[in-house]
């Protein structure tokens, strides 16, 4: 029995950072989508220049929402620590319309109303 393969696609931003990945098993490509692997698995995987593949459906961002990979000659490449750090916003630069006290009150109110009991 022959294994079925699926085309894997990526979307990237203006810097070449990979913003989205999928396979034709679940979604049809749009005009700007880039064919990343013509003979891929059913679940999306990143392809690296050394021929290795990522885990199925890998995270494309870190805990701060910073894009982890870029496309280089059609292959995924992990961005450098310096690039990742440059994309992170310092915590005090993020504007919020709520004060810290308002955020604490909201969380405490939610915890009381939810029946949550800290251990």
Image (cartoon, grey):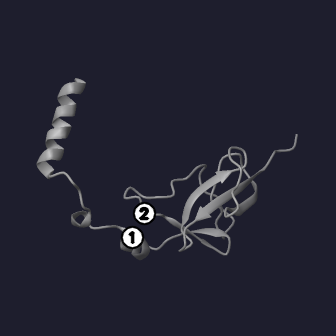
On screen, residue 27 above or below 117: below
Q: Residue at x 57, y 57 (%)?
A: 20
Whether residue 119 is visible to the viewer of this picture, yes or no, is: no
Element marked by disc 1: helix
Crowding at dot 2, Cα within 10 Å, few <14 / some 14-19 / many 20+, comes out as some
Number of labelled discs? 2
Q: Residue at x 24, y 26 (%)?
A: 114
Label ID, residue 71:
none
Q: Are marks 2 and 1 in contact (CB under 8 Å)?
A: yes
x and y percentages locating residue 16 in the rendered image: 57, 72
Q: CA distance from mark 2 to mark 1?
A: 6 Å
Q: Quadrant of the N terminus?
A: top right
Locate residue 13 relative to residue 116 in the image: left or right: right
x and y percentages locating residue 64 in the rendered image: 37, 58
Label ID, residue 87:
1
Q: Residue at x 14, y 45 (%)?
A: 102
Label ID, residue 66:
2
Locate residue 107 relative to residue 63 in the image: left or right: left
Judged from this view, the residue extending furthest toward the left is 101
Counting residues from the N terminus, which is met first, the one under dot 2 or under dot 1?
2
x and y percentages locating residue 97 in the rendered image: 21, 54
Element marked by disc 2: loop
Locate residue 109 relative to residue 62 in the image: left or right: left
* Quarter assignment of residue 112: top left
């Amino acid at each position: 029995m022959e294994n079925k393969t699926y085309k894997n696609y990526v979307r990237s931003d203006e810097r070449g950072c990979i913003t989205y990945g999928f396979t034709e098993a679940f979604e049809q490509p749009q005009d700007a989508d880039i064919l990343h692997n013509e003979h891929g698995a059913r679940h999306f995987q990143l392809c690296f220049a050394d021929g290795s593949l990522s885990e199925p459906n890998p995270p494309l961002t870190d805990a701060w929402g910073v894009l982890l990979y870029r496309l280089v000659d059609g292959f995924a490449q992990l961005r450098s620590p310096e690039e990742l750090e440059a994309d992170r916003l310092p915590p005090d630069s993020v504007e919020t319309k709520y004060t810290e006290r308002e955020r604490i009150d909201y969380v405490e109110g939610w915890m009381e109303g939810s029946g949550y009991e800290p251990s």
